[in-house]
Image (tube, grey):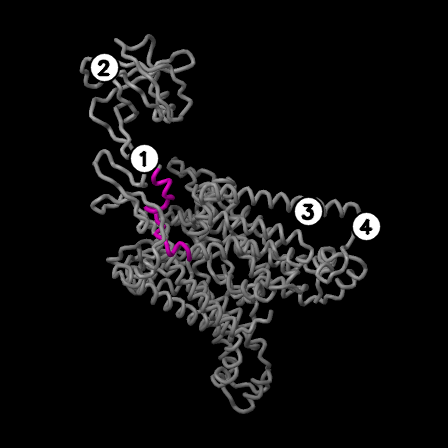
Amino acid sequence: MAMVQPRSIRARRWGAHLALIGFVSLIVFPLLLVISISFREGNFASGSLIPERFSLEHWSLALGIPWERTDGSVIQPPFPVLLWLWNSIKVAVVSSLLILMLATTSAYAFARMRFKGKEPLLKGMLIFQMFPAVLSLVALYALFDRLGQFVSWLGINTHGALIVASLGAVALHIWTIKGYFESIDGSLEEAAMVDGASTWQAFRYILLPLSIPILMVVFILAFVMSIMEYPMASVLLVDEHKLTLAVGAQQYLADHNQRWGDFAAAAVLSGLPITVAFLICQRWIIGGLTAGGVKG
Amino acid sequence: MFTTNASRGLPRHRSRHVAERYSRWAMRSLIGLMVLALLWLVMAFYLHGQWVFALLFLVLGTSLGVVFSRRSLMSHRYIFPAVAGLGVFVIFPLVYTVGISFSNYSSDNLLSQERVRAQLTDQSYQAEGAAFSYSLYQAGELVRLYLESDAPAGDNDRLLSAALNLTNSEVRRAPTQAVDGPPEGEPLPMRSAIQARDALQALRLQTPGGTELRMAGLRQFAPMIDRYEIRDNGSLYDRQEDQVLTPDNDIGFFVTENGERITPGWPVNVGFTNYTKIFTDPDIRGPFMQIFVWTFVFAGLTVLFTLTVGFVLASLLQWDQLKGKAVYRTLLILPYAVPAFISILIFKGMFNQHFGEVNMILEALFGISPEWFTDPWLARTMLLIVNTWLGYPYMLLLCMGLIQSIPGDLYEASAVDGGGPITNLMKITLPLIIKPLTPLLIAAFAFNFNNFVLIALLTGGSPDILGASTPAGTTDLLVSYTYRIAFQDAGQNFGLAAAIATLIFLLVVGMSVVNLRLSKVKV
């Protein structure tokens, strides 16, 4: 870059490194702390970052295995963390697949076809995407409450309701995929259609195989958003064995009974896979997130 | 850009493959089945008197049928599922919320008027006369009730019912006859009485004296009388209190002659009452205004702090003299990668006043131990600290992308002219990134304006505002405030919550319109 270099460049470089290291340690401290706490004995243990009295108690409880203390007393796991994680993953996979299907087909139409009402629809989607679901929770609750009278798998306290409700968040993904489709030249599909392919076939056999990367990104994005979804799950799910992780995890830190150590183990256990997945896919996810301007 | 064959008026694409024609038919019958299922739902809702939901599914079913049966709407088939999802789960709830805001829908006014009437007419009270304790005796497949008066008066003190089938729980009358003592055999255990409770409650036993006995407790039958009698003009006559209840459709309750309300009531349209309440009722207006201001302050400060931290870090990471940028970058976006519901809870534990690490460190270093969760200002400070931690990586990523797109020769020219870092910042970097950044900042503002998860998981709105008639906390945002009114308050005032939600809708619409203008979205 600059050919004209100030003399103090060395000092400034060291200064920058020091500032960054200081800031990074401040940022990472809570995360390291939680890992450390998950290995400490008891629920209120304090101490240094490297635990002095190492114990696998919290990890064993988080994995659902009863733990026997040295004094012989046996502690039962307080909450079914693995079940919650499984619920979360189940809901997230199904809803992301559905979102992916809906978003891809409509993104195709928006990117490639001319039809009535296209512009107002696209703009309307952008506006409605900014309304958080938490504002219409009363209405959503009423909707699923009534639906449950006739269709039992869509009632309150079902995963079906949670999955279906997440379809409202499809607008953001339509925009992401549409942008990608528009970056692909349409002449390939046109050639196929001249040769007698139907619109659907041109989409299915020409465009879709070219778009696998963006589909992966949208899937991961929808998956992460679904895992983190809190307001709707907190209203729609009631029974302990039906909860998703986002709703269940807070029970560890209920006001009158704080299980700090147990929470730490459960948090690392369930948060680590998501965090690692996010970091691996960060390049693509961040592109999608910063384009849409939201984080769930 | 092209359209489908159909909308260009070209002939139908005829597949040469049989398999494809089959799949086309499979598709058609699937759509047909879905339309039928939706119409069934419409009927079900309609028969239950829930015409709003009936209308919703009628619109859904018809549009599904129309879009998939008309060839000219071929393009719309592709967007239909997504648009339908958006319609049912975003737009309909929105409209319905606005609708609720004009009603008094709450836990007191929940059921329809017919259901309220049915609930009231189900009520009965114990008339003059002694109660009977009862026991059950097996009689072949069936069961007899043996009743013994608690206050024997001579006649009809011991009664025996006809043999009854206690698996049937419909309301029915059954005769009894006077007897001298219990029938032969052992009485059935209490358990079977509990099992047959529904059937017993539905029994109306006729004594030889002409009174009617009903179950009045788990172990008792007593002469019971329907409390309310339906009059022709729709009012109810209360036999016990000897008064007439008239339905008042302005407030959604039955009222007595003195104007007392009888709960439960039913939801009715109350016009702008909920809105006027927000702005005139001092117990609601005070907390509402306080929360309103705090919501703006919170969102504004969050954007300011996250942007400042993000921008400074981005400028540092952009400096080409720095080594190890990739490592720093990964570590710096860690807060973004950890699921928010976990990191927020981590902070909840860390800020705990008694055993949290933050207070332990502060105690060791400065000998202070702030009450993060009970002092309003400290709680707000904590929220801002946590939210800055959560939100700066997003700003960092945005700023990095934008700074990268600034041509390097601008800085070169500045260096030649003797410009320092401050000049570069003020004259080159900021002016160039502020324009593309603005719409994203507005989006971030709108997101934090409605940052429900943070409040719900970290403070839950507490500490509470004193003297508020609805649950309201000093750290509540408008969204969490509506959530608490609707789902945590004992009164569950859905109408009021919906009115506040509607006001937030308007604010969000305003923000997103400004946003669309600024970002000049090309469609």
Q: Position of residue A54 (x, y in %)?
A: 43, 48
The quarter of the rendered structure image containing the N terminus of chain A is bottom right
Instruction: Report the residue marked by disc 3.
Output: B27
Q: Same subunit under labels 1 and 3?
A: yes
Q: Could you tell me how far apart the alpha carbons at marks 1 and 3 are, in whole angstroms?
A: 51 Å
Instruction: Report the residue marked by disc 4.
Output: B16
Q: Mark 1 Cα within 10 Å, few/some/many (few <14, many 20+)?
A: some
Instruction: Report the residue marked by disc 1.
Output: B121
Range shown magenta: B98-117
Label 1: element kind: helix
Instruction: Report the residue marked by disc 2.
Output: B157
Asked if residue A253 is positioned above or below residue B326 in the image, the reply reads above
Question: Which residue is located at x 38 percent, y 46 percent?
Answer: A42
Q: Could you tell me how far apart the alpha carbons at marks 4 and 1 are, in whole angstroms?
A: 68 Å
Q: Same subunit under labels 2 and 3?
A: yes
Q: Mark 4 Cα within 10 Å, few/some/many (few <14, many 20+)?
A: few
